[in-house]
């Protein structure tokens, strides 16, 4: 039996499963993350931690958790956890890949279509009573998607799922950046690996699918936007700080790029003030990539399965650092 802390609301099913396995579970059924001081106090006797991407688990928290054996993040991204420090202390860390891949790619495509065809602007136009006459060239002319070039920055699981939708569903030519050549994707989708500048120069739609790391932080700045086509759209369903938001605003205002669709933000949950007030050619959503009931439930189940395995001394199926532990 281990002492488990669940930092935020994850629903009863996951909590039950951990309790049924005989663990002593402290469930903080709230939808706000704890402050650092609260989290430090809460983890004092914790052996198993279930956390969300809004819980920052860094050295300050790990220092306060001398009994911690395993952290199960209920997210595929794990930039909120200092995995390096956890590894040095023999703490296993797991994430929830696979179960959210297709759902997140669906959302990326929903945003891509929404920005290209100006769906939110059209919705607002109708509701404002502005539709008075059919016009051959209406004010809300959009962009074609079918047959255009899709640049996928980061060809991991989600990037590949976005690429598949583009190539197979919308006849798009796919360019991508990745560490190493993704032979299977190249064969299946006739995708071509490119350098980032090449991808930016050629793509009509650029989808960001990289994890947030020191290398990808502010990968997109004014300099990057200047390499894109003025008719191109940027879609970000990865992590906000990959884009320098102030620069994106300049790029949109000055027409350096055509539009952007963002699911994630640099200082989430806030948007850069200028960006929040900018309505044209910008589609925004509150980090909903994996947010369907079914998928969020599967993420919780995955995190619980990982934690139960780790605490039982078995390899968690989605351990991120099993090889790095001392
Ligand atoms: C969501 O952003 C996730 O990383 O799961």
Image: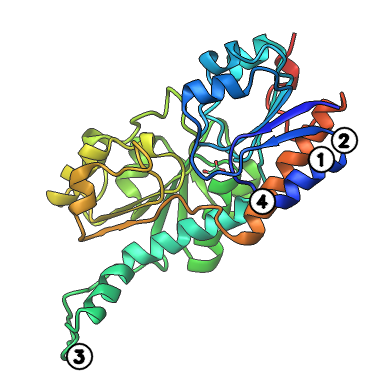
The answer to which image quadrant residue 89 occupies is top right
Assign a secondary structure to mark 4. Answer: loop
Is residue 82 visible in this depiction of the protein? no
The response on whether ligand 1 sits within 8 Å of label 3 is no
Q: Is residue 138 above or below residue 265?
A: below
The residues tagged by marks 4 and 1 sit, at their Cα atoms, a distance apart of 13 Å
Q: Nearer the viewer, mark 4 or mark 3?
A: 4
How packed mark 2 is, by other alpha carbons closer than 10 Å (few <14, some 14-19, many 20 or more), is: few
Residue 220 on image: x %, y %: 31, 36
Q: CA distance from mark 2 to mark 1?
A: 5 Å
Residue 289 percent across, percent down from the top left = 51, 52
Distance between mark 2 and mark 3 Cα atoms: 65 Å
Mark carried by residue 134: 3
Residue linked to disc 1: 19
* Tags 2 and 1 touching, CB below 8 Å: yes
Q: Secondary structure at mark 2?
A: loop
Q: Assess mark 4: CB under 8 A from ligand 1? A: no
What residue lies at 16% left-to-right and 75% top-to-bottom?
Answer: 139
**Residue at far bottom of view:** 133
Q: Position of residue 312 (x, y in %)?
A: 87, 27
Residue at the spot of label 2: 22
| Res 172 label | none
Q: Is residue 91 left or right of residue 147?
A: right
Local SS, label 3: loop
Q: In the displayed orientation, state which residue is furthest to the left.
A: 254
Looking at the image, tell me whether mark 3 or mark 1 is earlier in sequence order: 1
Nearer-the-camera pick, 277 or 206: 277
**Whole-percent x and y of residue 56?**
51, 27
Residue bearing mark 4 = 11
């Amino acid at each position: 039996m281990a002492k488990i802390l669940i930092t935020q609301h994850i629903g009863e099913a996951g909590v039950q499963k951990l309790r049924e396995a005989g663990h002593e579970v402290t469930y903080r059924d709230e939808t706000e993350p704890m402050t650092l001081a609260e989290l430090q106090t809460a983890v004092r006797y914790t052996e198993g931690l279930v956390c969300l991407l809004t819980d920052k688990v860094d050295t300050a928290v790990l220092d306060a958790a001398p009994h911690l054996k395993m952290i199960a993040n209920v997210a595929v991204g794990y930039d909120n956890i200092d995995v390096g420090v956890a590894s040095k202390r023999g703490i296993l860390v797991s994430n929830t890949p696979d179960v959210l891949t297709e759902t997140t790619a669906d959302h990326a495509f929903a945003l891509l279509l929404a920005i290209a065809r100006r769906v939110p602007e059209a919705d607002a136009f109708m509701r404002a009573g502005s539709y008075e006459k059919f016009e051959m060239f209406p004010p809300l002319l959009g962009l074609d998607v079918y047959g255009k070039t899709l640049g996928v920055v980061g060809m991991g699981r989600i990037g590949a799922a976005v690429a598949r939708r583009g190539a197979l569903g919308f006849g798009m030519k796919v360019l991508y950046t990745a560490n190493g050549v993704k032979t299977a994707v190249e064969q299946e989708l006739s995708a071509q690996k490119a350098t980032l500048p090449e991808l930016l120069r050629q793509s009509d739609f650029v989808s960001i699918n990289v994890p947030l790391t020191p290398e990808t932080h502010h990968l997109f700045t004014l300099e990057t936007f200047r390499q894109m086509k003025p008719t191109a759209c940027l879609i970000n369903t990865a992590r906000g700080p990959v884009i320098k938001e102030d620069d994106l605003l300049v790029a949109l205002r000055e027409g350096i790029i055509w539009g952007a669709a963002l699911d994630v933000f640099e200082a989430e949950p806030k948007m850069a003030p200028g960006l929040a007030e900018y309505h044209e050619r910008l589609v925004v959503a509150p980090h909903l990539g994996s947010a369907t009931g079914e998928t969020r439930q599967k993420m919780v189940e995955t995190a619980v399965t990982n934690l139960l395995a780790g605490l039982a001394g078995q390899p968690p199926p989605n351990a991120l650092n099993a090889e790095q532990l001392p």
